[in-house]
Amino acid sequence: MRFTQPVHWAEGLFLQPQHLQRSQQNAAQDSFALFSLHQPYPYGVIELELNEDALNEQRVVITKLKAVLRDGTLLDVPHNASIAPLQLSAEASRNESNVGGDSVIEICLCVPLLSNQQSNISAPQSHTGRYVLSTEEVGDENTGSGGQEIAMVVRRYNAFLCERSLVPSHAIALPLLHLQWASNAQGQRTLQRDGHYMPPYLTVSPSCPLLSLSQDLLLTLRQQQKQLQHQLSERALESKVLTASEVIELQVLSALTGFVARAQCFLQPQLLSPFALYLELVELLSRLSILRPQVSLQIPIYDHDNALPCFEQVLRLIRLFLHEESAGECQIFDFVPQTHNTQILQLNESAPLESPEIYLALQVELSLASASAAAGNSGVSGAGLSLLQVAQAIESGDNFRLLDPASYTERIRGVKLSYVRYPPQYLPQSNFNLLFRLKTDESVRVWHYIMGDKALLLDYAPELWGPVKAQLIVVTKAS
């Protein structure tokens, strides 16, 4: 970190471009220096949108991006920068092991550094200079639209994508994606994202995987909190006769209550940094470790450039401590094929559909799932989908519905499904590759009909999904 020397403005000064350039640089550097004092990791992605369909054509296309680079550069695509698509080729890959699909291709976002020796204005289609120039028509803010406009030349950042091994020495890089080679149903080479990698994020924004992971955890913690409150209230605890186990339960309840209360406030888009979320989760984990004092707690070290594995381990430990001692019992029901596009599940009167935790497990052949499902059946087809793409397409409800049999002919969405990326430890192991939690509280009307009929119907497009196997998993209270 370095603080700048201000320009000396005085009467009689012969104004040169260097005066304004230095003043502009000083303002940006000082602002970033102050920001860095309050942010342990003052760089990362804020918002990221990727064209997933372009990966099937071996291209990386960024449609929207907001990020802060390590030097404080503020990127806003397409507002102050444009990023050309990056074309990759399996045949021309420098590392032949990448073609096998196991090795990772790391894609970085690059911007040339500011140079004091060479021109910082880049020629078209060149990555040498930091800026490219463009012209905008700008009006007078005092007179409004009726005033005279002038042509103003503005700078846009000369940002580009490249593989990690090809990052030039004169550029600053931000890791953005991990890709792997795959093959579609026709045997053609495609690219798919590594679902276990997350770029460094400045805030937990809607495009950050940590937001949905933490919100899923919050649902589990709320349920555990209510269960503990119910158990303790049934015993009518008296302060003078507490057992050791009841003291532990009270401490766990205190930890859960405090975290849930705070999380309801900070688990909103762009209110928290990943590191701050990490500290919150680690504090919760350390307080829950009282459940198993015999276990040596190994907390993973935070890595801002590759934080997802660290969060996965912390979340896994939290769930393990919560459910190792009080795992819920599960009842599993299999759907039975009815027609070529429907499957039905008929339950008896004792089926515990009142449970607040119900899951739908699916087995889908990814190589047969059509890309038109992910595109809302817009006609894009002929490529196998990744697991995440299939899950997102099912969540959309356009070509996959869970509803009561009587509503089959109606144009309704069905029960809302939420993809569970990391299944709770207490669920039974199976070879089903997709798991969704039923949002019954957000599908009140349909779920009311299902509860009355004691029957569920799966309605899907077999030409999009191929053969589907389905199970309903109902989590019951621990005995």
Image (tube, rainbow, N blue to C red):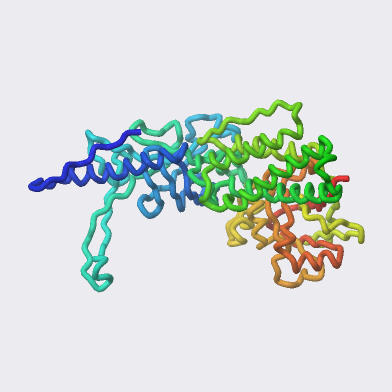
Q: Nearer the viewer, residue 432 or 40?
A: 40
Instruction: Return the x and y of residue 32 as percentages of the image width and height.
Output: 36, 42
Instruction: Return the x and y of residue 343 as percentages of the image width and height.
Output: 81, 59
Quadrant in the picture for the C terminus: top right
Q: How many marks?
A: 0
Q: Is residue 414 left or right of residue 164?
A: right
Q: Nearer the viewer, residue 238 or 188?
A: 238
Instruction: Return the x and y of residue 47 as percentages of the image width and height.
Output: 48, 50
Whether residue 385 can be seen here: no
Please name the residue shown 30% across and 36% down the image. Answer: 3
Whether residue 352 can be seen here: yes
Q: Nearer the viewer, residue 11 or 131?
A: 11
Please name the residue shown 60% across and 41% down the image. Answer: 280
Query: In the picture shown, does residue 464 fall above or below 184?
Result: below
Q: Nearer the viewer, residue 300 or 75?
A: 300
Quadrant in the picture for the N terminus: top left
Q: Is residue 366 left or right of residue 308?
A: right
Instruction: Return the x and y of residue 400 as percentages of the image width and height.
Output: 71, 60
Q: Is residue 388 left or right of residue 351?
A: left
Please name the residue shown 41% across and 37% down the image. Answer: 173
Q: Is residue 376 left or right of residue 170?
A: right
Please name the residue shown 29% across and 40% down the image. Answer: 129
Tell me where residue 131 sits by quadrant.
top left
Q: Residue furthest right?
A: 349
Query: In the picture shown, does residue 221 fall above or below 245?
Result: below
